[in-house]
Image: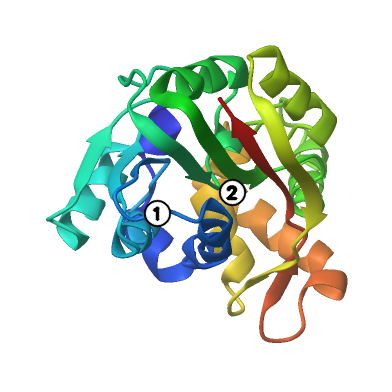
């Protein structure tokens, strides 16, 4: 929670707009209908909330990061945005659908989150989500952790939850969801510009740099860049190994 609250929303909007861009086709899977009441779980700065609203649905955007919600309200002042934790949503049988893009891999208590999502859905409501799956950004994380070891630094807690598709769908079924769609797929993702990788590390991967001084962080990032350049940098942009899970579950 504390780490997410420290996110740089300017860096998120300016350098990582691909998060919302790739979520656009998830909205097609959601297929919102006019008048439906939909929860956008992990709405970030609100771009996908606005897209769902433009298709005629009544949307509530929630995120646990106050800075994200503040920015969403600035960008879209006529929409409803709330600060809420995915594991403790304040809704009961209210939504026709819960939509979540690029959020649930940040939630290290997935059973609590799924329980809360299930509670918020109306009977026959649908849960449509995409998030990082097993092996997501493994090139980056392995390179960072190896460079930490080279510096003889203590191990850090891995900040993400990247399940297998079997693990996650089994958990959904345990909590009474009827899983109607499940997919684990590769989605190579471009990080724009020579600073794309270091911007990604500073935005999303800073937890792997815990315990390092500013000088050590900079040195480690340079070493990671040099290590990954032969296979991940084309001279202009970086290409990283995103692996995503998509699921649909019915209450």
111 or 176: nearer the viewer: 176
Instruction: State left or right for residue 239 relative to residue 7.
Output: right
Which residue occupies 50% across, 43% down? 100
Which residue occupies 51% across, 64% down? 24
Q: Are marks 1 and 2 in contact (CB under 8 Å)?
A: no
Which residue occupies 33% across, 54% down? 45
Estimate the x, y position of residue 164 in percent, counting from the top left. Answer: 81, 33
When asked about the image quadrant of residue 22, the answer is bottom right
Estimate the x, y position of residue 189 in percent, counting from the top left. Answer: 69, 67
Q: Quadrant of the C terminus?
A: top right
242 or 138: nearer the viewer: 242
Q: Estimate the spatial distance between the alpha carbons at disc 1 and disc 2, rounded to whole Å.
A: 47 Å
Instruction: State left or right for residue 179 relative to residue 204.
Output: right
Which residue occupies 78% across, 67% down? 226
Residue located beneath label 1 in the image = 33
Q: Secondary structure at mark 1?
A: loop
Estimate the x, y position of residue 170 in percent, counting from the top left. Answer: 77, 21
Q: Secondary structure at mark 2?
A: helix
From this view, report whether residue 94 is shown above or below residue 119: below
From where the camera sits, is residue 86 visible? no
Q: Quadrant of the N terminus?
A: top left
123 or 17: nearer the viewer: 123
Neighbor class of circle 2 (other Cα within 10 Å; few <14, some 14-19, many 20+) is some
Neighbor class of circle 1 (other Cα within 10 Å; few <14, some 14-19, many 20+) is some
- Residue 217's tag is 2
From this view, report whether residue 104 is shown above or below residue 154: below
């Amino acid at each position: 929670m504390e780490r997410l609250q420290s996110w740089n929303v300017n860096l998120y909007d300016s350098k990582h707009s691909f998060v919302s861009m790739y979520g656009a086709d998830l909205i097609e899977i959601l297929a919102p209908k006019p008048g439906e009441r939909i929860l956008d779980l992990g709405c970030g700065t609100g771009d996908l909330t606005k897209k769902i609203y433009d298709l005629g649905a009544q949307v509530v955007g929630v995120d646990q990061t106050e800075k994200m919600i503040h920015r969403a309200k600035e960008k879209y002042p006529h929409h409803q945005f709330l600060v809420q934790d995915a594991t403790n949503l304040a809704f009961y049988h209210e939504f026709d659908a819960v939509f979540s893009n690029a959020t649930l891999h940040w939630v290290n208590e997935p059973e609590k989150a799924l329980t809360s999502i299930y509670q918020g859905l109306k009977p026959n409501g649908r849960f449509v989500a995409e998030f990082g799956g097993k092996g997501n950004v493994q090139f980056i994380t392995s390179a960072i952790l190896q460079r930490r070891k080279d510096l003889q630094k203590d191990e850090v807690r891995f900040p993400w939850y990247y399940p297998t598709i079997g693990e996650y769908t089994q958990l959904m079924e345990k909590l009474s969801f009827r899983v109607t769609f499940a997919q684990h797929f590769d989605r190579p993702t471009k990080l724009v510009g020579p600073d794309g990788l270091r911007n990604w590390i500073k935005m999303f991967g800073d937890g792997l740099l815990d315990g390092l001084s500013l000088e050590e962080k900079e040195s480690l990032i340079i070493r990671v860049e040099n290590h990954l350049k032969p296979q991940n940098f084309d001279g202009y942009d970086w290409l990283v190994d995103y692996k995503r899970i998509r699921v649909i579950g019915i209450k």
